[in-house]
Amino acid sequence: MPMIDLINDLTKLNRTLTLDEDLEGFTVSPTLRNEHADVHALLFANKDRILELLNESNTLITAIETWAKDDSNKWKQAHSKFLKDYQPIPYIQDAHDDLISWLHANQRITSAREKIQKLQGKKNKSEKDKVALNARYSDIYAYLTIASGRRCRLITNLLLHSDLYGQINGFMDKQNGKKKEAITSQ
């Protein structure tokens, strides 16, 4: 059974595959019970390859995070790039949805942090400024929750979307190429 079919089978069984935080394992939730012994056996037999694929997806997502860091304009640039070709499918959440939502959440987080920094530097804050500060803290909390959940889903769902994986790779190659060109031209 190809790896994609195995991951699709987990989806059909309403199970999620999640890379562990230490990157040394993965979790299937809810746990597979005896009624799905065949799928459990396939997961166990292919655990090293599945872990390798999940780590490759994680590395790609980490590359975007490293490139964009705390620059809301870079997050917005990435979001705009992938939003351009985005065609949502009603009633289906896939890697494209996860990517768009994750990029947008990170753009909103960095934008809120920039506004907080600007407001904190202001002397004699008005009541409006204090309310705006509290609102930006709330934004960060809400969007961190969204970004975290979508990041986990994106890592797994990229395994089912090699076309999107390739597009992200191409985008990052282009961004890293721009950076190298700028450095060498100085």
Image (cartoon, grey):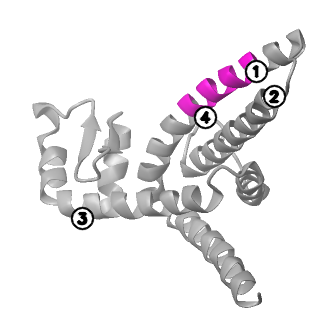
Front: mark 4 or 3: 3
Magenta region: 134-145
Dominant SS in magenta: helix
Q: Earlier in the sequence, mark 1 or mark 2?
A: 2
Residue under the point 71% across and 58% down: 78
Front: mark 1 or 3: 1
Read off the residue under disc 4. 91
Residue 124 falls left or right of residue 111: right
Residue under the point 59% across and 66% down: 168
Read off the residue under disc 3. 49
Read off the residue under disc 1. 133
Q: Quick one: which residue is furthest to the front in this view?
A: 123
Whether pointer 1 and pointer 2 mark residues with C-beta atoms closer than 8 Å, the reply is: yes
Residue 149 falls left or right of residue 182: left
Front: mark 2 or 4: 2
Q: Quick one: which residue is furthest to the bottom in this view?
A: 185
Q: Earlier in the sequence, mark 3 or mark 2?
A: 3
Magenta includes 139? yes
Which amino acid, by three-letter code, is at mark 3?
Arg
